[in-house]
Image (cartoon, grey):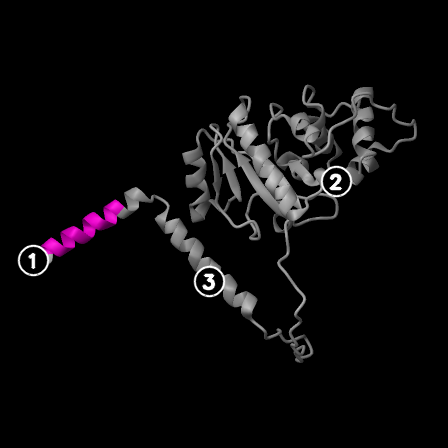
Amino acid sequence: MKKYWIYLAAIATIYSCSSNPYRLSDKSYKKQLKKFQKTLANTQSSPLQNGTSPEWISTVNFNLRKPNFIIIHHTAQDSLQQTLKTFTLTRTQVSSHYVISDDGKIVQMLNDYLRAWHGGNAVWGKNTDINSASIGIELDNNGSEPFSEAQINSLLDLLSRLKKDYNIPAQNIIAHSDIAPTRKSDPSAFFPWKTLADLGFGLWPDTNMEQAPENFNIEQGLRIIGYDTRNLSSAIKAFKLHYIQTEVDDVLDEKTINTIYSIYKKQ
């Protein structure tokens, strides 16, 4: 009889895992949330260097901090399932709020108010902790092929909700390559930034661009847009990947300079 119950327990475990392959990651997620709940409920201030502790008196005027950027990535992997596996293994140390498959399916992996590990070592303007201020969206794409219509349509639907819910400025919808120009080149040049910008998600240069003034400081212009220009060559390449796309190099020709000036004026 004992063997019978052991057998039934084993069958139940196998069935549970097969019906929900992410059961363990769901369990871990809820466990971490409980830890954060305790942290948020704590009303004891940490002691200062002089040994005193601030007095705690609770205010009644507060809410949750909200994301102010959306960072778009491509997964550089070959399937949605491969990406989901990557984001549910502790050892990978990487995650994202949303993943959108090639067929348009949207998978949410983290509450919008929680900090995903998607940006890595990144800078935008004076913000040196992009993960703490952003929502990460990964598109299921290996980087060498166009993004599907279904995928982009789902992305647009998601962006509509996120921009409305958190009042995210159009210019704060940017690329992984924008915030990490020395390390990243996603999403690829296939990504339809103009389509997004036409609908209010991101910026795009004017059709009839104004000639940049002779004294226009290109590096300063890129910094004001948000780029980290400590490696100017990489910053120029990242800018061109986003706003020109047909020429992804560090050549500062007339078209590139006028395009930088066009985006600079929109800040």
Residue depicted at x 82% and y 25%: 258
Q: Quadrant of the C terminus?
A: top right
Q: Measuring from the top left, give residue 134's x and y in whole percent.
A: 62, 46
- Which marked residue is nearer to the observer: mark 2 or mark 3? 3
Q: Give the mark, 2 or 3, whose residue is nearer the N terminus.
A: 3
Q: Measuring from the top left, give residue 261's x and y in whole percent.
A: 83, 30
For residue 227: magenta?
no
Badge 3 is on which residue?
34
Q: Is residue 56 visible?
A: yes
Q: Quadrant of the N terminus?
A: bottom left
Q: In the displayed image of the protein, which residue is found farthest to the left?
A: 1
214 relative position to 221: left or right: right
Going by the numbered disc 3, the residue's amino acid type is Lys
In this view, the residue in front, 29 or 87, is 29
Going by the numbered disc 2, the residue's amino acid type is Gly
In this view, the residue in front, 224 or 154, is 154
Image mark for residue 226: 2
For residue 13: magenta?
yes
**In this picture, which residue range is highlighted in magenta?**
3-15
Q: Main secondary structure of the magenta part?
A: helix
Q: Quadrant of residue 227?
A: top right
Q: Is residue 113 above or below residue 58?
A: above
- Which marked residue is nearer to the observer: mark 1 or mark 2? 1
Badge 1 is on which residue?
1
Secondary structure beneath label 2? loop
